[in-house]
Image: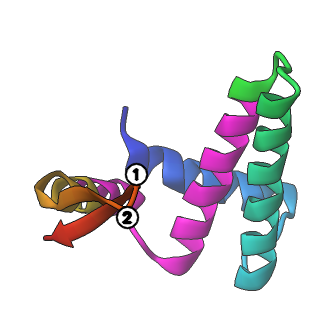
Amino acid sequence: MDLMKIQKDVYQNKVNKGFNVTNVEKEFCFLYGEVSEAYEAYRKKKDDLGEELADVAIYLLGLSEILGFNLEEEILKKHSKNQTREYKIIDGVNTRIGD
């Protein structure tokens, strides 16, 4: 899967269909709405949960392109960072104790 190509395709589809590509605040609100829809699908055990999760990813990819981030690179960097972090259960809470 070439996430950068998909990111660019998602953005181009937004342009082609006349969707927002300039108001970042609005895109964050739309993303939040899609996360909410995914949660509702999960909570109500709906069959369209996978589709709702895909909507979240699509909005995130579009927002990344609008903001000029290569989401694939950012995910790989963050994943690598998360793998080296140390955690410990403190008072019942999984707490980061080191990077």
Q: CA distance from mark 2 to mark 1?
A: 6 Å
Looking at the image, residue 12 lies above or below residue 66 = above
Is residue 9 rendered to the left or right of residue 94?
right
Amino acid type for the residue under numbered disc 1:
Met
Q: Horizontal and vertical percent for residue 90?
A: 31, 62
Which of the numbered marks, if any, corresponds to residue 80?
Answer: none
Q: Are marks 2 and 1 in contact (CB under 8 Å)?
A: yes
Q: Is residue 23 in sight in this rendering? A: no
Indicate the quadrant where residue 46 lies.
top right
Indicate the quadrant where residue 61 lies.
bottom right
> How many numbered discs, if any?
2
Mark 2 vs 1, N-terminal side: 1
Which of the numbered marks, if any, corresponds to residue 4?
Answer: 1
Q: Horizontal and vertical percent for residue 89?
A: 29, 55
Tag 2 residue: 70
Of 94 and 27, which appears nearest the observer?
94
Of 45 and 64, which appears nearest the observer?
45
Check the picture and name the quadrant holding the N terminus: top left
Please tell me whether residue 94 belongs to the stretch shown in magenta: no
Give the residue displayed 72% in from the left and 43% down from the top: 55
Check the picture and name the quadrant holding the C terminus: bottom left
Give the residue displayed 67% in from the left and 48% down from the top: 56
Is residue 29 rendered to the left or right of residue 6?
right
Q: Main secondary structure of the magenta part?
A: helix
Amino acid type for the residue under numbered disc 2:
Asn
Secondary structure at badge 1 equals helix
Residues drawn in magenta: 51-76
